[in-house]
Amino acid sequence: MQSIAANLEDIRKEIKAACIKAGRQPETVRLIAVSKTKPAAHIKEAFDAGQVEFGESYVQEFLEKSKDPLLEKSPISWHFIGHLQSNKIRSIIDKVRLIHGIDKLSTAEELSKRAQQHNLQIDYLLEVNTSGESSKYGMLPDEVLSRAESLFKLPNITLRGLMTIASPESEKARVEFRNLRLLLESLKTVAPDPEKLTELSMGMSGDFQEAIEEGATMIRVGSSIFGWR
Ligand SMILES: *Cc1c(COP(=O)(O)O)cnc(C)c1O
């Protein structure tokens, strides 16, 4: 197996190639290295190879890793990308740069309440179920628009964009990525500060090229960097 550093280098080249194909600047796509289930030593290896943004999915695991002595001197920027229950918000709120998986108005309300208590300003993304599969988390596109007004009013939290996990089939995935981008455009037309809605978190190991071609600003890549889980 290749080293984590070599995997990262490959991914960065692929990101660049996908950007060139799409006529985009490579700096407009941020790589989030998804380190769930992987030990702190592997995160350290990626950090030492220049990777700063990491994504974690499970609250307990994230909390343990975020205080691991191995990573003490590594100023990592953590993204929480998993499904987030309201009762877990409190424990992660002051440790993450961006929360990707808010999928209910009630969870956003709890996030706002906790952000006020901690006197923090928190950025978040709404998770959208673009495939319509009932097994997936996320708001349906119509729900995003109907909840928008309430979401925009919540103090101490800022909606920065949308996130999705697409279908495994790449042609379906491409349509879903495109629909997420169109949904973000619709959301901007009703937003008080549309210039804050800049992020599309979409694309994983198997489909990030398509996601970049459809406008992803953050891709979340795990197994292509760290190996199989
Ligand atoms: C695990 C996970 C990823 C990374 O998936 P890979 O296929 O390993 O790249 C991306 N996004 C979310 C939300 C995940 O849970």
Image (cartoon, helix red, strand yellow):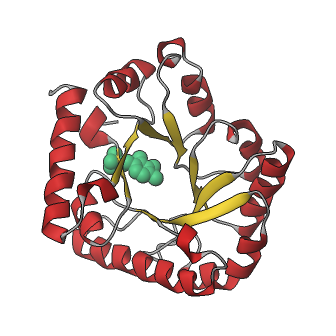
Q: Can residue 127 be seen here?
A: no
Q: Is residue 84 above or below residue 77?
A: below
Could you tell me how many numbered marks the image carries?
0
Instruction: Please give the name of the residue rendered at 72% of the width and 43% of the height, measured from the top-left corner.
Output: 88
Residue at position x 78%, y 57% from top? 112
Q: Nearer the viewer, residue 101 or 183?
A: 183
The image quarter in which residue 157 lies? bottom right
Residue sitting at x 33%, y 70%: 215
- In the picture, which quadrant includes the C terminus? top left
Question: As displayed, is residue 32 above or below residue 138?
Answer: above
Please tell me which residue lies in front, 201 or 107: 201
Query: As rendered, which of 118 and 80 lies closer to the eye?
Result: 118
Residue situated furthest top in the rendering: 69
Residue 144 at x, y = what percent?
A: 61, 78
Give percent across and percent down for residue 6: 17, 30
| Residue at the extreme right of the image, as rendered | 117
Please say whether residue 195 is visible from this viewpoint. yes
Left or right position of 189 against 199: right
In the image, what residue occupies the spot 29% across and 73% down? Answer: 214
Q: Quadrant of the N terminus?
A: top left
The percent position of residue 136, horizontal first and vertical second, equals 51, 65
Left or right, 183 with reference to 147: left
User: In the visual, does 3 lie left or right of 64?
Assistant: left
